[in-house]
Image: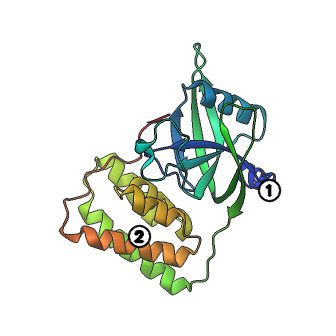
C-alpha cells in the first residue's frame, strides 16, 4: 500500500475545506499552492501535523453578489494529500497537493478553527468498460488533442508520454480534464462524474466542440494557484 492509498484508507470522513473561485483539482494531478491567508495557514499547519489531507472545493456561481457571506460550494470536491511543502519565514506555505479522490460534501460542521470543515464521503471510480473500448477512447483523445496543441516541445513531449505511457484511462482522463482549457462549469461537471466511461465521453464531447475553435495554446502543466 502506497502513501496515497494509506491516506485514503485513513480518511475519517471529515474534510478540511480549501475553497477557491477558479480552480478545480482532479485526482492524479499535482498542484502547487501559495498559502498566505491566516485561515489557510492554519488549515495547512493542521493538515501537516495530521493526515496531510485537504479538500479543494469550488465556489458556486453567484458568490460575488454576497461577498460578506461564506460562499456556497459545489457538492463535489477533490480530496488531496500534501506530498511536499516549504514554509517561508513569514509563515506562508508553498505545498504540493496531489489529488487522490473525488469527494461528496454532505454537510458543513461547526468548528472553532478559522477554516471550514465538512462531513464528506469518498467517490471511487466506477469502471465497467471493455479493453477495446478503452483503446478506442485513448486514440480518440489523442487524435483530438495532439494536432491542436501549441505548447513548447517539452510540453508536447510530456503530453505524448501521457498518451503513450501506461497510465490507466481514469488517470489520463483526469489529467486532461485538469490541464485543458475547459470552462469551470465543464470541469466541475467532469469532476462530479464517478463513472469513467461517462466522464471520458463527456471530455470527448467537449473536445469535439473545439473543432471550430482556436488551437489549444495552453501551458502544460498548470501553474501556481493562490488562495
Q: Is residue 33 above or below residue 9?
A: above
The residue nearer to you, when weighing 223 against 194, is 194
Residue 173 in sight: no
Q: Is residue 92 above or below residue 13?
A: above
The residue beneath circle 1 is: 9
- Element marked by disc 2: helix
Image-based side of 181 in relation to 52, left or right: left
Looking at the picture, how far across and down is residue 180, in whole percent? 37, 57
Image-based side of 194 in relation to 134, left or right: right
Location of residue 187 (image quadrant): bottom left
The residue nearer to you, when weighing 24 against 150, is 24
- Element marked by disc 1: helix
The residue nearer to you, when weighing 122 against 153, is 122
Q: How crowded is the residue under tag 2: few (<14 C-alpha within 10 Å), some, or many (20+)?
A: many
Looking at the picture, how far across and down is residue 147, in whole percent? 25, 65
Q: Are marks 2 and 1 in contact (CB under 8 Å)?
A: no
Looking at the image, which residue is at 55% across and 51% down?
A: 73
Q: Is residue 12 above or below residue 197?
A: above
- Of the 4 image quadrants, the one containing the N terminus is bottom right
Looking at the picture, how far across and down is residue 50, in whole percent? 78, 36
User: Which of the labelled discs sits on residue 203, or is there none?
Assistant: 2
Location of residue 8 (image quadrant): bottom right
Amino acid at each position: 500500500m502506497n502513501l496515497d492509498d494509506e491516506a485514503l484508507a485513513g480518511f475519517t470522513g471529515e474534510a478540511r475545506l480549501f475553497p477557491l473561485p477558479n480552480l478545480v483539482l482532479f485526482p492524479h494531478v499535482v498542484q502547487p499552492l501559495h498559502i498566505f491567508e491566516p485561515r489557510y495557514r492554519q488549515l495547512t499547519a493542521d493538515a501537516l501535523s495530521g493526515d496531510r489531507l485537504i479538500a479543494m472545493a469550488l465556489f458556486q456561481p453567484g458568490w460575488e453578489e454576497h461577498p460578506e457571506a461564506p460562499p456556497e460550494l459545489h457538492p463535489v470536491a477533490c480530496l488531496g494529500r500534501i506530498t511536499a511543502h516549504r514554509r517561508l519565514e513569514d509563515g506562508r506555505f508553498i505545498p504540493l497537493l496531489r489529488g487522490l479522490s473525488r469527494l461528496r460534501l454532505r454537510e458543513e460542521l461547526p468548528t472553532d478553527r478559522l477554516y471550514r470543515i465538512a462531513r464528506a464521503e469518498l467517490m471511487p471510480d466506477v469502471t465497467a468498460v471493455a479493453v477495446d473500448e478503452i483503446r478506442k477512447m485513448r486514440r480518440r483523445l489523442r487524435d483530438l488533442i495532439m494536432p491542436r496543441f501549441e505548447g513548447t516541445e517539452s510540453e508536447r513531449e510530456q503530453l505524448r508520454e501521457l498518451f503513450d505511457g501506461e497510465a490507466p484511462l481514469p488517470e489520463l482522463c483526469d489529467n486532461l480534464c485538469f490541464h485543458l482549457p475547459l470552462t469551470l462549469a465543464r470541469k466541475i461537471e467532469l469532476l462530479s462524474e464517478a463513472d469513467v466511461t461517462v466522464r471520458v465521453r463527456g471530455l470527448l464531447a467537449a473536445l469535439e466542440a473545439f473543432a471550430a475553435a482556436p488551437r489549444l495554446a495552453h501551458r502544460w502543466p498548470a501553474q501556481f494557484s493562490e488562495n
